[in-house]
Amino acid sequence: MKKDTKIYIAGHRGMVGSAVWRTLEKKGYTNLIGKSSKELDLKDQVAVLNFYHTEKPEVVIDAAAKVGGILANNNFPYQFLMENMQIQNNLIDSALKTGIDKFIFLGSSCIYPKFAPQPLKEEYLLTDTLEPTNEWYAIAKITGVKACQAIRKQFQKDYVSLMPTNLYGTHDNFDLKSSHVLPAMIRKFHEAKLKNNEPVELWGSGTPMREFLYVDDMAEAVVYALENELPEYLYNVGSGKDITIKQLAETIQKVIGHQGQIVWDAEKPDGTPRKLMDVSKMKEIGWQYSTELEPGIQKTYTWFLENIENFKEVKL
């Protein structure tokens, strides 16, 4: 991979896409392309094909998706299914049609069955039913994985799918209505600290176990896939380690310096008891994570404080 290879990052303004952009720039890549949704509607098949013809990228990294929490997935199943399929199908199919030999597709660990054995191995894909609350998004992502696999099989092109665990880091969503557990906790503990260390109420029992990966580590995995030809079509990307939600809360509380009480609302749902990725395949080919959880949370909290004015009024 040459440093002036023309690389298009779809979704370059999102948490993952922006981390990939920053990481590539740090490594000396000089020919990166990004388009905002106003500049290029990825749901428009003709627009995407024309963009490829005009810009002629040599590599595509697909970090673009319609994303949201359980509430949004439940309320808008059709949009989560159809818009995600439109985005990825246009990006993948147009890449094939315009002769692009390398494509990196980014998905989510939700592609695996709800009751799959732990830790989650790549071969568990399509072995059982999905989690009902986000099956629409998951099905869309599975079709993207399978499209890339089909292109590898039929056309021998280097199209690979990377499935990350729960990601966190700079440029995350800290809106309490729609954010994921880690950024939501950062905001809750921060605001409680400002209010004389008032108690922080959290959902569930605190016993479920979750795995987290700092987003810059995910970006490093993407660059590894960019600079190497990976032998298989699907790879999990994570730390391979999990902690309880209670341990997560106590770690975030420590980083933020909140001195108050944590109150667990056991009437609220816990969700899946455990969701851990088997990351042995990535490790075997030479990549593994480097950022431990507490230093990653510290970096994220620093960024949160520096940018707090920008996301105070985020709405669903």
Image (cartoon, helix red, strand yellow):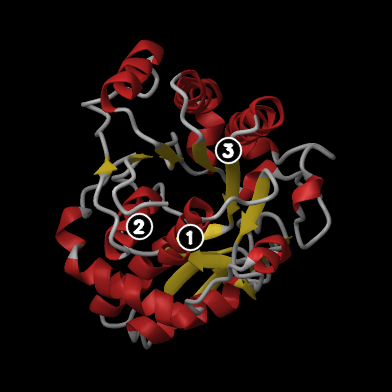
Q: Nearer the viewer, mark 3 or mark 1?
A: 3
Residue at 79% across / 61% down in the picture? 118
Against 244, residue 78 (above or below) is above
The first of marks 3 and 2 along the sequence is 2
Q: Nearer the viewer, residue 72 or 14?
A: 14
Mark 2: which secondary structure?
A: helix
The furthest residue to the left: 309
Residue at 32% across / 64% down in the picture? 27
Report the residue marked by disc 1: 218
Residue at 38% across / 84% down in the picture? 255
Against 175, residue 208 (above or below) is below
Q: Is residue 172 left or right of residue 143?
A: left
Cα–Cα gap, marks 3 and 1: 18 Å
Tell me the kind of residue under disc 3.
Tyr
Tell me the kind of residue under disc 1.
Met
Report the residue marked by disc 3: 159
Cα–Cα gap, marks 1 and 2: 8 Å
Instruction: Using the image, tell me which numbered label, if any, was put on residue 13.
Output: none
In percent of width and height, residue 277 lies at 69, 61
In percent of width and height, residue 301 lies at 31, 73
Quadrant hosting residue 60? top left
Mark 1: which secondary structure?
A: helix
In percent of width and height, residue 189 lies at 36, 73
Q: Nearer the viewer, residue 174 or 200?
A: 174
Cα–Cα gap, marks 3 and 2: 21 Å
Tell me the kind of residue under disc 2.
Ala
Against 279, residue 9 (above or below) is above
**Is residue 262 something that shows in the picture?**
no
Q: Residues within 10 Å of mark 1 (few under 14, many from 20)?
A: many
Q: Are marks 1 and 2 in contact (CB under 8 Å)?
A: yes
Report the residue marked by disc 2: 19
In percent of width and height, residue 171 lies at 30, 57
